[in-house]
Image (tube, grey):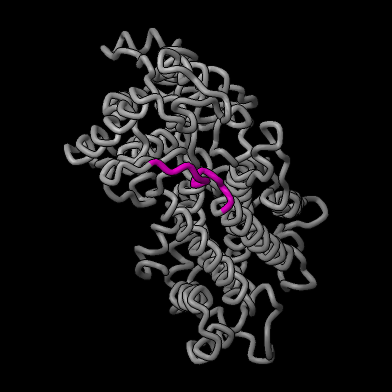
Amino acid sequence: MLVRLGGTLTIGDVVAVAEGRAQVEVPEGARESLAKARAQVDRIVAAGLPVYAITTGVGKLASVPVSREDADRLQLNIVRSHAAGVGSPAPTGVVRAMMLLRAHGLALGHSGVRPEVVDLLAALLNRGIHPIVPEQGSVGASGDLAPLAHLALALIGEGDVMVGGERRAASASLEQNGLRPLCLRAKEGVALVNGTQFMTGWGALTVHRAFRLCAAADAVGAMTLEALRGGSAAFHTRLHQLRPHPGQQASAENVRRVIAGSALVDSVPTRVQDAYSLRCLPQVHGAVRDAVTYASGVVGVELNAVTDNPLLFPDEDLVLSGGNFHGQPVAVAMDFLAAALAGLGTMCERRVERLLNPALSGLPAFLSTDGGLRSGLMLAQYTAAALASENKVLAHPASADSIPTSANQEDHVSMGAAAARKAATVVAHLEQVVAIELLCAAQALEFRGSAEMGLGTAAGHALLRETVPALDDDRVLAPDIEAATVLVRSGRLLEAVERAVGVLR
């Protein structure tokens, strides 16, 4: 697969590059756009015109002029001084997404960098050389300054990179791959460190996982519905036509398809209606789906945005200094996503409780064949509760906070990087909660009889049993939870169900 810079990127493109399944190319049209904007920067420097971050300092120092002779040195100083990140290194996939988006944004031709800058970013991606970027340090206002500065260090042969799972000096890695470090010229340092690529790259990967997780949660919820012998009326098409939220309709349809052919659903004629965690699955899961769709739309716009400052319009000989780097759109979307997914986690955890509680399920306590001597899946619910509860804490919006920076020049910040990191953590926790529900639903179905399952349910149950046997006696549950989480996180569970019933919405 080949991803071309300077056109239009999709979330799918970002995921492919992040996972190392795609190469990156700088097409000729992008080179022409880069050259035109670069020529405009050269004219500004030659004329000594006062333009932010080209012939002036940055942030609160914007009013301090910088001479023509020092214009290049300014850019080197910006990169070095802004590389102030702390914390654990960001995951390799996030760094690759960030590199792709930085290269793409520059290739759109409004940043004034030379083609060599984008070429080197593309070369690092294609050769698997990844700057080490600390997770923390961005307030998401003048873009993700600290993370992007750590990325830029590798381009000038400074700092460390990861190559083949090993940490190496950037200078040595460039030399070993026949690449030369950049000598930054006017505008290039600030163009590299200004932008929302850290939060957006992380956000794109998180949205991708969230979409897949929503479908998996529908499928696992349907398994629980069967195991508890719930009713199908709450998922009827006619009911959802009267409240036609797109996500709600999609979730209801998914459940109908997964339980098709089930002899367990509607098998208790005296039951008028089920508890909310079953009956309201389409409404709750559907609202989460709609939140993911919103976040996806915001991220989709941001992938193709030019977010450094100032921006150049060479055809009009125009330079505009503004605030496209401010991360508020992404921050709000990631906060919304985290809050919505946290709600889905509490829904899944309540279904786990219903499966394990004999007063609610009519099944043996904690799905154990010999309660008392054996504890069964009792502690699985504890873990689901712990994860769901932690997600509630993480649902607090980062974007509601703001701490002024740069001597109050940057007096409102987005905290978008923190919002993106929190949303990714919420997704990871939710994948584990859904996996725990899968374990419990499958164990409950052992007591109901496999011949009674619906088509989709049977497929999900069979896949789990390939790696996790039924719980006949107490054993360490952590490996079971991890194995089930891999099925959910990798998409294998969803693929198995979809092979049986068709692609879920």
Q: Nearer the viewer, residue 218 or 439?
A: 218
Q: Please provide percent x and percent y for residue 460.
A: 47, 60
Indicate whether 81 appears above or below 221: above
Instruction: Name the side, left or right, on which 194 lies relative to 499.
Output: right
Task: Locate residue 23, reporting x and y percent.
Answer: 26, 35
Residue 214 in the image, given as x and y percentages of width and height:
52, 62
Residue 368 position by quadrant: bottom right
Is 362 drawn above or below residue 426 in the view shown? below
Image quadrant of residue 110? Answer: top left
Please tell me which residue lies in front, 118 or 173: 118
How many marks the image carries: the answer is: 0
Q: Position of residue 17 (x, y in %)?
A: 35, 39
Specify whether residue 308 is painted magenta.
no
* Camera sees residue 425: yes
* Residue at 37% from the left image edge and 36% from the top image edge: 111
> What is the span of residues highlighted in magenta in the rendered image?
319-328
